[in-house]
Amino acid sequence: MSQRKVALAVIDLQEDFLPPHGSLAVAQGRSVIPLINDLVTNRQFKWSAVIATQDWHPSDHTSFASQHGVAPFTELEFKHPLDEKDPVTNEVIIKKQVVWPDHCVQESSGACIDASFLGNFNSISPNIVKTVVKKGYLSDREYYSCFQDTWGLHHTEMEKFLRDNKITDVIFVGLAYDYCVFNSAKDSAADGFNTYVLKKCCKSVYPEKEAETDELYRKANVTIIEDDSYVDLLK
């Protein structure tokens, strides 16, 4: 039987997603940071790899409401970035997506990863491979997943990093449970990795819809962990 190799993926612990000053702050988002720091620093957790992701948008990113002259959280229609057409209708494929306040603009303070987590991340044992995966740097498309854009066209280095390091299992934590954590975990499972989300280490944009979000995880073959059973994966 092949050896289990487990990676921790920490999604978007960035200042613009964190209260009290983040432009797209997730309620109580900062409360998960001590828990995630413990995952990184506690030597009982035998990680094979740790990945931190970072939204990294140009100032004219298409997901910004300001680029469209509408209020944040408006749902708009977006055309396929390469003008791919629907084979049935012969019309350019359209996707409806929400637009957001400007956030995580490259080199801005809001794009910075939380300092306490980043310090612990940078101090990880050299025996544990680590990387920062940036996403959202192409201006003409949305990214929720750390694997690819929402159209499945551009792929980050995430999958290659996991495969190069022979990772078998990935545990996701971070922000937000119902957006970037979910979409990243969904793609991880679809790529064949045993995939888990540690729910106590996540917060949602829409916590009132969490039961629906949980069901989406289950349909995507992602295991939701709500107890300490993850410790058994790391022995």
Image (tube, rainbow, N blue to C red):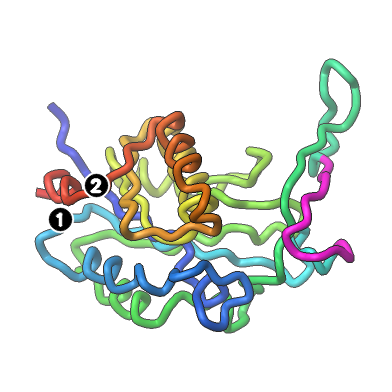
- Say if mark 1 contacts mark 2, CB within 8 Å: yes
Image quadrant occupied by the N terminus:
top left
Mark 2: secondary structure: strand
Residue 103 placement (x, y as % from top left): 65, 71
Closer to the camera, 218 or 190? 218
What crowding class fits label 1: few (fewer than 14 Cα within 10 Å), some (14-19), or many (20 or more)?
A: some
Mark 1, residue position: 46
Residue 65 placement (x, y as % from top left): 79, 64
Pointer 1 or 2: first along the chain: 2
* Amino acid found under the numbered disc labelled 2: Val
> Tag on residue 85?
none
Is 78 within the magenta?
yes
Residue that lies at the very extreme toward the top in this rendered image = 88
Residue 222 placement (x, y as % from top left): 37, 36
Residue stretch rendered in magenta on the structure: 68-79
Is 103 within the magenta?
no
Closer to the camera, 96 or 4? 96
Image: 193 above or below 204? above
What crowding class fits label 2: few (fewer than 14 Cα within 10 Å), some (14-19), or many (20 or more)?
A: many
* Amino acid found under the numbered disc labelled 1: Lys
Closer to the camera, 48 or 36? 36
Please indicate whether residue 198 sits to the left or right of residue 28 in the image. Answer: left
Among the 4 quarters of the image, the one containing residue 43: bottom left
Label 1 and label 2: CA atoms lie apart by 8 Å
Image: 141 above or below 69? above
Mark 1: secondary structure: loop
Mark 2, residue position: 6
